[in-house]
Amino acid sequence: MIDLALLRDEPELVRRSQIARGNAPETVDTALEADRSRRSALSAFEELRAEQNAFGKTVAKAPKDEKAALVAQAKQLADRVKQAQQAAGAAAEAAASALDRIENVIIDGVPAGGEADFVELRRVGDVPAFDFEPRDHLELGELLGAIDMERGAKVSGARFYFLKGIGARLEIALMNLALDKALQNGFTPMIVPTLVRPEIMQGTGFLGEHADEVYHLDKDDLYLVGTSEVPLAGYHKDEILDLGDGDGALRYAGWSTCYRSEAGSHGKDTRGIIRVHQFNKLEMFVYTTPGEAEAEHDRLVALQEEMLTALGLAYRVIDVAAGDLGSSAARKFDIEAWVPTQGAFRELTSTSNCTTYQARRLDVRYRPASDAAGETVKTTNVATLNGTLATTRWIVALLETHQQADGSVTVPEVLRPYLGGIDVLRPLGWTPPADEGEA
């Protein structure tokens, strides 16, 4: 949820954020009224309960001949207290529901609008040019014996696949390259649960309008995660963290399999492994102070750019528009790599600053340093951020960007140590030309 003090003190700021996201501004007025009703109902209940406690002492001290009448009055008062408690509970539920419709307040400068209204911040690298007709990633993957969509569909259905042989090795190499990058920058590696409780999924903001994209196991009431952001956000639920006086941010790199139903994507990216139900991902997740969150956001993007540049991919960085952020993010930067056969940039990474939104829902706090007078400052919510450092989809851009006319693919130098020194991926059955002699 958003900061209630912010909602009460600066409703116009919240209203502008809702409008920029494409949400009805009336949701702010509804939330304010629900909050007032909740506080009023709670106050009425607490007053009656205090009256009940005081009256109970009067009954206890009353003479025997007066007690019968007083006990009858106490019973009536108890009924009123019970009704007030129920009213306070109902008002609290109504307020929670109204507040849940208020998405995280966007950061100044985030473009308004929907998916098409992003702002391009920069382009890096040269878009590849070929003197032959380039193959798409699936054709290349089949030539290399790296991707098998047909058997994936046979075993599990549409949008499933097998990575095999060099395809499996390529994904593991990418993930290990990313893991090394994370380790070099102070991240703690994590293998996370991929099934989480409803309160964790709800707390991260994934059970709003896009809840139909999440897989749910009815029998166990558990959700399959679409990113390790979810379990990592829940890792410190109900805790007070020690973030220190300087850069005491807690940085995690979560390696996990991810699951997405891709609801609403019928007919989109049905060929290959661009939009699938299951994939692997290394996700960066950071707990930091609200004051450091924007600088940390820039650091995460810089790490992603270092990875993509090292892999020889042309890309652009975009500032995602408010209506395409998702409920938790106050700002999101996507990095899209060039996919030659589509003649377009496609998303490879997404990096979000969720400010204190998730931490409020999951009750993750920290204790700021004492003030100048030595007084202890009360705990406050941390800020959380997340960003992709490698995922299965990267294989698409890698294969297509570095392909050769004969169907082979040059391995970026940075990946070669993770592939046992292989510098070129060759099609199955490939034999060297006669003038190259024996391999």
Image (cartoon, rainbow, N blue to C red):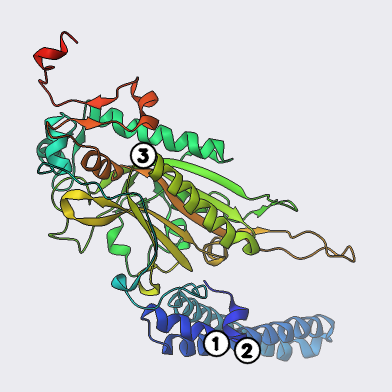
Horizontal relation, residue 62 to residue 322: left or right: right
Q: State the SS at label 1.
A: helix
According to the image, label 2 marks what residue?
A: 76
Q: Is residue 329 visible?
A: no
The residue positioned 55% from the left and 41% from the top of the image is 187
Q: Amino acid at mark 1?
A: Pro
Q: Residues within 10 Å of mark 2 (few under 14, many from 20)?
A: few
Q: Is residue 240 visible?
A: yes
**Residue 350, quarter of the rendered image:** bottom left
Callout 3, which amino acid? Answer: Leu
Which x, y percent locates residue 54? 78, 84
Say if mark 1 contacts mark 3, CB within 8 Å: no
Could you tell me if the residues under marks 2 and 1 are in contact, i.e. CB atoms within 8 Å? no
Q: Is residue 26 left or right of residue 410?
A: right
Q: Position of residue 84 (x, y in %)?
A: 58, 85
Q: Position of residue 208 (x, y in %)?
A: 37, 68
Q: Residue at x 46, y 88 (%)?
A: 30
